[in-house]
Image (spheres, rainbow, N blue to C red):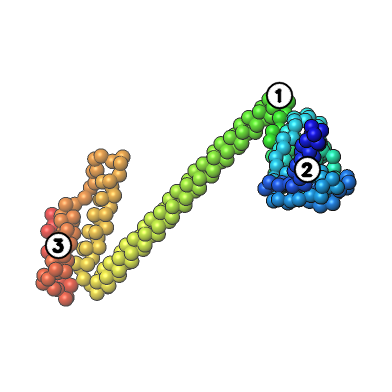
């Protein structure tokens, strides 16, 4: 009696365990591979599934979500023989659960080593300056190579990012000195260009001033010449009028002409800077008579008696 009860209990437990092993609930974001007598047969997607007892079992639990892994730091020798330490981060997602489970052993370890190898290959083909300034190019090349290599594993590598690139301390100091020298050089160049521009502007200003001054002198000379021409025309006209009057026998015109020249000669003598006292043997009556002729002509010009016969004015004699 006691043995039959134990056997019944064992049977119930075995049945429950068998039933539990045949009913599988796959959570969201995961896929399970199913093996039948050790051979892959199908993939279980999220939801409730029932397996064939004894014959089927779950082989691998595959995470189908996008995952991130750190790429360990490693030393890389660049094309110009500079040693740098590089680390990064990679993002990947399993697209085919069966391939990721059965095409490669230790998927994450394989991706990490593949990425590290290609980091050394890509960065080793660049100079240090290119390495520090072209991270986007490095990331793109790494992504292209690693994604192509992991396609047969049912994995999609979505991103690879280089986090840190650390050159040796002495190289960093040299780069800092070089950068400082370059900045000082650019500052000197800018200062020289500023001085050059200022000199050019100053020269242009002086040139413009000289041009304007020359144009002013030319305009002044033109106006002086025009004034002299008009004065000469006026003098010629006056001379012509006097000559006409003289030819007609007008004594007043003769007196005007003589007195005018006489006064001009006196004015020239008086304005000489080296003359202070002028003594000339002149007759006062002649000067007065000439001045009288001038007055008579002025009177006739402004409405006085007109003497058409050219009458002789009275000239006092001494």
Q: Nearer the viewer, residue 220 or 239?
A: 220
Q: Residue at x 54, y 40 (%)?
A: 194
| Label 1 crowd bin: few (<14), some (14–19), many (20+), radius 10 Å | few
Image position, residue 59 (x, y; %): 81, 43
Helix, strand or loop at disc 3? helix
Measure how far apart labels 3 and 1 are at the Cα level.
111 Å
Helix, strand or loop at disc 1? helix
What residue did someone put label 1 on? 169
Image position, residue 2 (x, y; %): 79, 32
Helix, strand or loop at disc 2? helix
> For the N terminus, which image quadrant?
top right
Measure how far apart labels 1 and 2 are at the Cα level.
69 Å
Q: Residue furthest top?
A: 170
Q: First in sequence, mark 1 or 2: give its number.
A: 2
| Label 2 crowd bin: few (<14), some (14–19), many (20+), radius 10 Å | few
- Label number found at residue 15: 2
Q: Residue at x 68, y 36 (%)?
A: 163
Q: First in sequence, mark 3 or 2: give its number.
A: 2
Looking at the image, residue 30 lies above or below residue 85: below
Q: Nearer the viewer, residue 169 or 188?
A: 169
| Label 3 crowd bin: few (<14), some (14–19), many (20+), radius 10 Å | some
Q: Mark 1 or mark 2, which is nearer to you?
A: 2
What residue did someone put label 3 on? 295
Q: Mark 3 or mark 2, which is nearer to you?
A: 2
CB under 8 Å between discs 3 and 1: no
């Amino acid at each position: 009696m006691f043995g039959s009860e134990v056997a019944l209990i064992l049977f119930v437990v075995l049945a429950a365990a068998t039933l539990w092993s045949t009913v599988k609930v796959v959570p969201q974001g995961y896929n399970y591979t199913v093996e039948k007598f050790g051979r892959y047969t199908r993939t279980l997607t999220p939801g409730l599934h029932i397996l064939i007892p004894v014959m089927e079992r779950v082989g691998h639990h595959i995470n189908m979500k996008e995952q991130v892994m750190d790429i360990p730091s490693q030393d890389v020798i660049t094309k110009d023989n500079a040693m740098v330490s590089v680390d990064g981060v990679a993002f990947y997602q399993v697209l085919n659960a069966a391939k990721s489970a059965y095409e490669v052993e230790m998927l994450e370890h394989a991706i990490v080593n593949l990425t590290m190898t290609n980091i050394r290959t890509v960065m080793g083909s660049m100079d240090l300056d290119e390495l520090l300034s072209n991270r986007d190019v490095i990331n793109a090349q790494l992504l292209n190579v690693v994604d192509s290599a992991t396609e047969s594993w049912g994995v999609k590598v979505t991103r690879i990012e280089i986090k840190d690139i650390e050159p040796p301390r002495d190289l960093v100091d040299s780069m800092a000195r070089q950068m400082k020298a370059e900045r000082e050089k650019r500052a000197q160049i800018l200062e020289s260009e500023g001085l050059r521009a200022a000199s050019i502007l100053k020269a242009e200003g002086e040139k413009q001033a000289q041009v304007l001054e020359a144009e002013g002198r030319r305009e002044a000379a033109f106006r002086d010449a025009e004034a002299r021409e008009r004065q000469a025309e006026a003098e010629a006209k006056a001379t012509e009028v006097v000559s006409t009057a003289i030819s007609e026998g007008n004594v007043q015109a003769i007196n005007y002409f003589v007195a005018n020249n006489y006064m001009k000669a006196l004015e020239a003598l008086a304005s000489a800077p080296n003359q202070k006292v002028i003594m000339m043997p002149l007759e006062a009556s002649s000067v007065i008579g000439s001045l009288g002729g001038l007055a008579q002509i002025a009177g006739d010009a402004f409405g006085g008696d007109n003497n058409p016969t050219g009458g002789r004015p009275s000239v006092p004699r001494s």
